[in-house]
């Protein structure tokens, strides 16, 4: 199932997206998409709606340097354990919403990522049972003010600006995350191309590690790390992140 969130002629709603590409229908979900969704009976052509970020997360947890080649391009070795950092939920935007470069930064980078969405409250989840607490998976862009990340020595400011966490276009359930392509394009030119099978820490291992530290809540998002090929974006460009079997998340870039 594809679970999304749209602005329809009747307001904002969670939906199930059904049908062939270009002819999709958005069926309105009553209340929320967790558990077994129930439907209101209302639906719209997806093309008649505006696709929003598929979830409003309580928190966004991200994993740093989870691809060896990316760790190398950042000038370091791959960490033995997952490195956790966080982004505020106010950084979330949906497809086609502009990424806004702050005037205080001279370099803002794209970082295409594969993202986990949690489906129920959980703590201390064994890796083998991670699938039981996951709602599904989506596409993300861990936008980073690279100069500020390097200047500060920690990552909160450089990764925390409003608009710095595009998500979407939807959450796909019943999905095997073990070996799918992740690709980032800037103005149509491929900048990142890798596979989730090259992650140093698997989805199960990540959920186990993070849930040892903090309780995870329905809708929480975990970004699983970016592959090599990161680079800067400038105003007027467009960045698109694709995950095989899920879809493409595309956003224009503007200056504030």
Image (cartoon, rainbow, N blue to C red):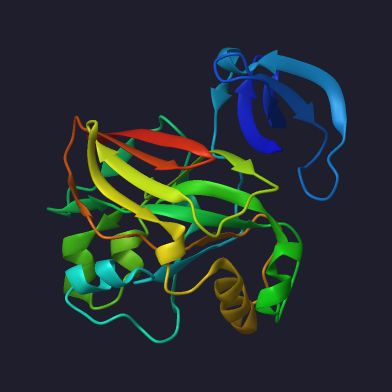
Nearest the camera: 219 or 36?
36
Q: Residue 49, relative to residue 116: is it above or below? A: above
At x 47%, y 54%, the residue is 114
Residue 130 in percent (x, y) is at 69, 69
Nearest the camera: 171 or 213?
171
Side of 34 relative to 234 (left or right): right
- Would you say residue 142 is visible in this rendering? no
Q: Residue 182, relative to residue 248: is it above or below? A: below
At x 72%, y 57%, the residue is 119
Residue 144 in percent (x, y) is at 28, 57
Side of 92 relative to 149 (left or right): right
- Would you say residue 141 is visible in this rendering? yes
Residue 7 in percent (x, y) is at 61, 24
Instruction: Locate residue 84: give its quadrant.
Output: bottom left
Outermost residue to the left: 106
Side of 124 relative to 51 (left or right): right
At x 51%, y 40%, the residue is 168
At x 62%, y 19%, the residue is 20
Instruction: Locate residue 63: give its quadrant.
Output: bottom left
Residue 139 in percent (x, y) is at 48, 46
- Quadrant where the C terminus is found in the figure: top left
Side of 249 relative to 187 (left or right): right
Q: Residue 186, relative to residue 19: is it above or below? A: below
């Amino acid at each position: 199932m594809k679970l999304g969130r749209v602005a329809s002629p009747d307001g904002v709603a969670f939906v199930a997206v059904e049908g062939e590409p270009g002819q999709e229908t958005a069926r309105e979900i009553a209340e929320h998409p967790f558990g077994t969704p129930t439907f209101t009976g209302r639906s719209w052509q997806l093309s008649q709606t505006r696709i929003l970020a598929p979830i409003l997360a309580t928190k966004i947890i991200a994993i740093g340097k989870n691809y060896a080649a990316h760790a190398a391009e950042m000038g370091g070795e791959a960490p033995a354990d997952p490195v956790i950092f966080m982004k505020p939920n106010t950084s979330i935007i949906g497809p086609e919403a502009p990424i806004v470069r702050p005037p205080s930064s001279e370099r803002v980078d794209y970082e295409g990522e594969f993202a986990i969405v949690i489906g129920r409250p959980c703590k201390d989840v064994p890796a083998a049972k991670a699938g039981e607490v996951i709602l599904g998976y989506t596409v993300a862009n861990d936008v980073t003010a690279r100069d500020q990340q390097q200047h500060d020595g920690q990552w909160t400011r450089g990764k925390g600006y409003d608009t710095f966490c595009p998500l979407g276009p939807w959450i796909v359930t019943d999905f095997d995350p073990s070996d799918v392509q992740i690709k980032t394009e800037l103005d149509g030119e491929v900048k990142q191309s890798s596979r989730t099978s090259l992650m140093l820490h698997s989805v199960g291992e990540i959920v186990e590690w993070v849930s040892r530290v903090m309780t995870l809540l329905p809708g929480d998002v975990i970004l699983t790390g970016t592959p090599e090929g990161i680079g800067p974006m400038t105003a007027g460009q467009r960045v698109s992140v694709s995950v095989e079997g899920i879809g493409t998340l595309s956003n224009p870039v503007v200056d504030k």
